[in-house]
Amino acid sequence: MKPEVELGVFEVQEGSGRRSAPGSADLRMPVVQALLPFANAVGSRTVEVELEGRHVRGEPEPRWRVVAATTLEPSEPPEEMQDIAREYRAMQEEILRHWREEVKDSARLAGVWSFEQLAYWYVGGFIAKGALGAMEAVAPTVVSVLGRGGAKAAQWFRTVLIRTPPAEREALQRIWMKVEAEGLTALKAGEQAELRHILARVEKALHEPLDRQAKKRLRQWARREYFDTVNPRLARELGPLRMEEYEIHHRIPLEYARLFPRMDINQGTNLVAVERTVHRSINRVWESVGQQAQRLDNRQVEALSRVIDQQYGSWFHRVHVPAESASALATAEQNALRAVKGLLER
């Protein structure tokens, strides 16, 4: 850390009762000596230094000493961002612990984190470092969602990281590690340009179809999160073996995530557990859209999703015995196919 001294107003006190101590006629020396211990920490910080000056009659210059030096803490974030701030502080504590005890290479540390941990780390950093304003020109969708604050913003950013190609994720990680340690102003012109390029690419990817690898990861993640967090009761009711017969249905399908860039496609309200034969029937209804799928807009997709909900809702989130409702499932599929055809012909 390179100390930068900004002098403020000080008050001359006489007869304060403080004991004298060795000082210096050069004001810079005691300030620098006081700031040196703060250089052992990670990242930039603002330090408030309390100085005491003593002028002895007959001496040409006063003598100065540092009475106290403390770090100024940033103001608390808005209430709606408090949960993000807590998670971010937890990430920072983990960074420091690993750096001191286990990992010297910051890239290796970030490599062992989950997408969820990385999301909280990034989003918390964007907020704490005041980076959202600088990002808005190249990533307006990202800024609009993260600006809402709250855990939902970080959860949404998890899916953004999954959509981002590995090379760009690694570059973002490398640059942001430097920002965390030294601040935004430490980035060189080339690094600033690279960061803008990555964020612009992230923004563009939100409006593009998901690739096969992203879909695979999101489906795996949705299954784990649904049974662990959204509906653990159903997981207990089914048991490990029977749970294998159930799949996770996205009410707004992954194929249409590009039409809903501000939506967390893996949020709990978009996930439904259904028995495998029911899910296959639902998929046949969506597949009936055919080549028109590329021309659908978000309102049409929402309308088709409501048709699925209406016809298949009785099988959502519950134990199902295929043999007992085969005819009802066939009827639901035919009704849904007719409704979808009608919507597409309007």
Image: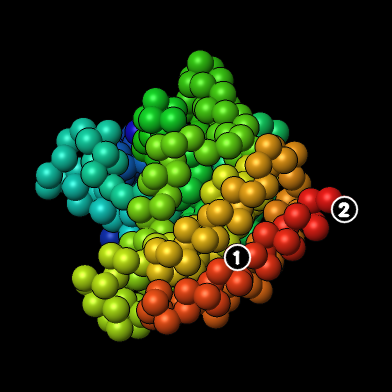
Looking at the image, the residue that sits furthest to the front is 327
Label 2 crowding class (10 Å Cα cut-off): few <14, some 14-19, many 20+?
Answer: few
Q: Amino acid at mark 2?
A: Arg
Using the image as rendered, state which of residue 130 and residue 260 is in the foreground: 260
Report x, y in % for residue 301: 70, 54
- Residue drawn at x 20%, y 51% is 97
Residue that mark 1 sits on: 333
Q: Amino acid at mark 1?
A: Glu
On screen, residue 227 above or below 223: below
For mark 1, give the secondary structure: helix
Using the image as rendered, state which of residue 308 and residue 29 is in the foreground: 308
Q: Sequence order check: which comes first, mark 2 or mark 1?
A: 1
Label 1 crowding class (10 Å Cα cut-off): few <14, some 14-19, many 20+?
Answer: many
For mark 2, give the secondary structure: loop
Asked where in the image residue 109 lies, by quadrant, the reply is top left
Marks 2 & 1, CB-CB < 8 Å contact: no
- Residue drawn at x 40%, y 64% is 276
Report x, y in % for residue 185: 51, 30
User: On residue 346, which mark appears?
Assistant: 2
Which image quadrant: the N terminus? top left
On screen, residue 22 above or below 240: above
Asked if one can make out residue 236 in the rendered structure from this viewpoint, the answer is: yes
Using the image as rendered, state which of residue 131 and residue 14 is in the foreground: 131
- Residue drawn at x 38%, y 46% is 217
* Count of numbered tags: 2
Q: In whole angstroms, how far apart are the C-alphas of marks 2 and 1?
A: 20 Å
- Which mark is nearer the camera, 2 or 1? 1
Asked where in the image residue 314 lies, by quadrant, the reply is bottom right
Asked if one can make out residue 63 in the rendered structure from this viewpoint, the answer is: no
User: On residue 63, which mark appears?
Assistant: none
